[in-house]
Amino acid sequence: MLKLLVKTINPIERVYLCVDGIDELQPQDRSEVHRALRQIIRDAPNARVFLTGRPHIRGEVGRHLTDGAYSIHIVADKGDIARFITRKMDDDNARDPDLMTENLKNDIMRTMSEKASEMYV
């Protein structure tokens, strides 16, 4: 499949591959993905790879994909996160007012804001 992918993208002037949440893969699966991405980059010089993941994965990605690699640290805006989460909980509350207590809503807001600020691209 990898050879077919490379053969398919080679005639195209520029191809962007996006792998979102690379940190969510099991370590043994990440190793295979890193190997495949290295091969794509080597065999299809027109391909550009964009990965997202949490900060703990940065070193691993850097060890496997170093040629021409850039790392951008992006911190989520807590106000945007709070508005998004509030809207989603309000939607859920409109469907089922007994779904969650105020304490649960506050815990969700706090936890989601903390966890989202740990993301990087």
Image: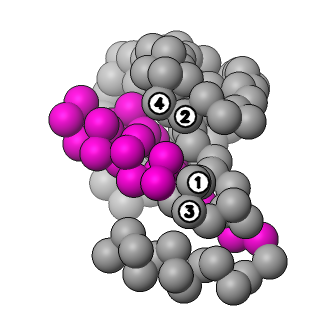
Q: Which residue is depicted at the point 40% across and 42% down?
A: 34
The residue where tag 2 is placed is: 65
Q: Position of residue 121 (x, y in %)?
A: 64, 33
Q: Which image quadrant: the N terminus?
A: bottom left
Mark 1 nearby-residue class (10 Å; few <14, some 14–19, many ≥20): some
The residue where tag 3 is placed is: 43
Cα distance in 3D space between marks 4 and 2: 4 Å
Q: Position of residue 11 (x, y in %)?
A: 69, 85
Pick the residue in front: 116 or 49: 49
Q: Which residue is depicted at the point 74% across and 30% down?
A: 70
Q: Are marks 3 and 4 in contact (CB under 8 Å)?
A: no
Task: Specify the amino acid type for callout 2.
Answer: Leu
Pick the residue in front: 34 or 81: 34
* Membership of 33 in magenta stretch: yes
Cα distance in 3D space between marks 1 and 3: 6 Å
Q: In the picture provided, is 101 more to the left or to the right than 65?
A: left
Q: Are marks 1 and 3 in contact (CB under 8 Å)?
A: yes
Residue depth check, mark 3 versus mark 2: number of the one nearer the observer = 3
First to last magenta residue range: 14-39
Q: Are marks 2 and 1 in contact (CB under 8 Å)?
A: yes
The residue where tag 4 is placed is: 64
Q: Tell which residue pokes out farthest to the right in this image.
A: 13
Which of pointers 3 and 4 lies earlier in the amino acid sequence? 3
Task: Specify the amino acid type for callout 4.
Answer: His
Which of pointers 2 and 1 lies earlier in the amino acid sequence? 1
Residue depth check, mark 3 versus mark 4: number of the one nearer the observer = 3
Which of pointers 3 and 2 lies earlier in the amino acid sequence? 3
Looking at the image, residue 71 lies above or below residue 30: above
- Identify the element where label 4 is drawn: helix
Pick the residue in front: 35 or 101: 35
Q: Quadrant of residue 71?
A: top right
The residue where tag 1 is placed is: 41
